[in-house]
Image (spheres, rainbow, N blue to C red):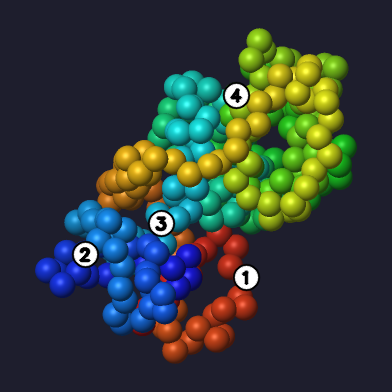
Amino acid sequence: MCGVDGVGVLDDGTRVFFAGSRRPYGAMAEHTVVARARCWPVPEGLDDITAAALPNPALSSWLPLKWRAQLAAGETVLILGASGIAGKLAVRIAKILGAGRVVAAGRNGQVLRTLSDFGADAVIHLEGSDQEVTLAFAREAGDKGYDVIVDYLWGHPTELLLSALTRAEFSLKAAGPRLIPVGESAGPAISLPAAALRSAGLGILGGGFPPMNILLDAYHQAMARAAAGELRIDTERVALSDVEEAWPRVEHGRRLVLIP
């Protein structure tokens, strides 16, 4: 996050990812002040730009799948908002964690066309009509349905998904899908039909904040995968002197990294 986290070097030369600088200091500076407990080592072989850009969106994907949803090998995962930075990572991380099938739904068609490279087995373009999107959700669920849904959008796309889940012909299992809301880029509120909970067996799991050992384990695993080339994130280097020009830009699927 801009001004909150980044990559730096401690006095002893250790290269670390850090978060939570002490006010009034911040990450957009040559020197900052951070509690040692909030400085985590960066693996050798992982460049500074990737190390700075990856943890925040990667953990917002890894933790919902692993810690909250308890994703099991072979399960089917739906990523709502898969054309965003965290959503793209979630597609890949779901596969790394053993998902049998990953369905990626997003609003950016250009990015959606690249998601098979990240491990997506199917994509749903959310820019279609409500009927088209609802039918696509039902179609891609197949006979097994969705086991885990990670939702970065909320709002109207989630309402269309709930419409699909409550269709009479929708194939249901004894246990319904586990829905983990992460973001709300499409809207802060939804209309939740009782049938989604009653007949579809939907379970909604809040994100929450994990214990430190869970957080650190997810960080180390994600960074190790990145160092091994199994996780990648599109980035753009921006000099701090150019921050005024870069700040208002909207980058689809790419993370800006400021260089002091």
Category of crowding for the residue at label 2, using alpha-carbon neighbours closer than 10 angstroms: few (below 14), some (14–19), many (at least 20): some
Residue at 78% across / 17% down in the picture?
199
Give the SS element for disc 3: loop
Q: CA distance from mark 1 to mark 2?
A: 30 Å
Q: Nearer the viewer, residue 232 or 150?
A: 150
Category of crowding for the residue at label 1, using alpha-carbon neighbours closer than 10 angstroms: few (below 14), some (14–19), many (at least 20): few
Give the SS element for disc 1: loop
Disc 3 marks which residue?
A: 54
| x then y, percent, for residue 153 | 68, 48
Q: CA distance from mark 1 to mark 3?
A: 18 Å
Mark 4 or mark 1: which comes first in sequence?
4
Mark 3 is on which residue type? Leu
Q: CA distance from mark 4 to mark 1?
A: 32 Å
Disc 2 marks which residue?
A: 15
Q: CA distance from mark 4 to mark 2?
A: 39 Å
Residue at 30% across / 73% down in the picture?
33
Task: Tell me, yes or no, if residue 230 can be seen here.
Answer: no
Disc 1 marks which residue?
A: 250
As drawn, is 196 to the left or to the right of 13?
Answer: right
From this view, report whether residue 240 is shown above or below residue 2: below
Category of crowding for the residue at label 4, using alpha-carbon neighbours closer than 10 angstroms: few (below 14), some (14–19), many (at least 20): many
The C terminus sits in image quarter: bottom left
Residue at 55% across / 41% down in the picture?
207
Farthest residue in the bottom direction? Answer: 241
Say if mark 1 contacts mark 3, CB within 8 Å. no
Quarter of the rendering containing residue 171: top right
Mark 2 is on which residue type? Arg
